[in-house]
Image (cartoon, coloured by chain):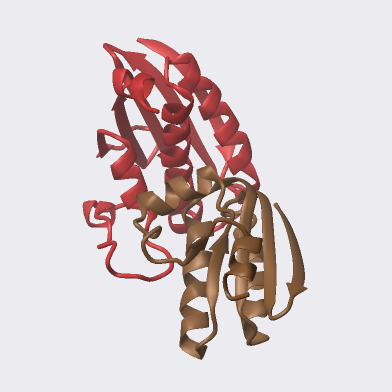
Chain colours: A brown, B red
Amino acid sequence: MEISIREVAPFRIVSLSGDVDLHSSPQARQAILDAIKQKLPLLVELEAVRYMDSSGVASLVEGYQAARKQGTEFGLAAVATPVMNVLKLARLDRVFPIHASVEARLTRDA
Amino acid sequence: MTTLLACNYPANTETLATVRSAVLEAATRAGASTDGANDIVLAVNEACMNVIQHGYRFAPDKVFRIELSTADDTLEILLCDNGEAVSERQLKPRALDDLRPGGLGVHFIRALTDTMAYLPPDETWRNRLQMRKRVGLLAARQ
């Protein structure tokens, strides 16, 4: 798994790629929670994720709950099919705000 | 019965990618579609995670075994380990409305397989989790 972080004001964008599994999800979780601590609206970009297991899903849930607790925006963007499949299996596709792409969210309020 | 995979693996998180690759190949050979094979990979991965996390509690130098076979249009997966004994209670999935991190693994396994059950221990393995899925369903999955 690889993680890249960028900022496109006012958002912080955490991009994950590769396999987000029990081996790599602790790093994904930490990157998401670190970004939330900055109190910036956060988008997690998942376009290049090939595989996600329940530990990866748990990292997203934890981020979503932490962001809600402090009143900042949390959303998923460009969700790859393997990730969408597990989100649907957990019925979380109805819980997370999901955007077609980072750009789609950025231009929504323009 | 046709055996498609029978292998011991070190019980650590680095192993999971290797397990997924082997299970994907075996499920495909069994006749599963791409989506069907991916369902089996996810179910087996979750079961292996449970062994590593809860059975062995990330202890080093532990081993689990995976066997995949087909017989009478059924794909059978057997996951064996010597971690802490698992009770039937731990096989119950949590309610999905209860939004919290974790606890989804059993739900995934149950949703993606036809049956899951623990077989009695044998002389080698304390826990023997059997998961079954009809091959016809895996082949038609898209």
Horizontal arrangement in the rendering, residue A2 relative to residue A89 (left or right) = right
Image quadrant where one finds the C terminus of chain A: bottom right
**Picture layout, residue B22 above or below residue A56:** above
Determine the image quadrant of residue A23. bottom right
Is residue B125 visible to us here? Answer: yes
**Picture layout, residue B72 above or below residue A88:** above
Viewer-proximal residue among B99 and B63: B99
Residue drawn at (30%, 29%) of the image: B132
**Picture layout, residue B82 above or below residue B76:** below
Is residue A29 visible to us here? Answer: no
Residue drawn at (25%, 39%) of the image: B117
Viewer-proximal residue among A83 and B127: A83
Residue drawn at (62%, 40%) of the image: B17
Find residue B130 and report its horizontal and vertical position in percent. 32, 33
Residue drawn at (41%, 40%) of the image: B43
Find residue A107 and report its horizontal and vertical position in percent. 63, 68
Find residue A96 and report its horizontal and vertical position in percent. 44, 66
Horizontal arrangement in the rendering, residue B134 relative to residue A108 (left or right) = left
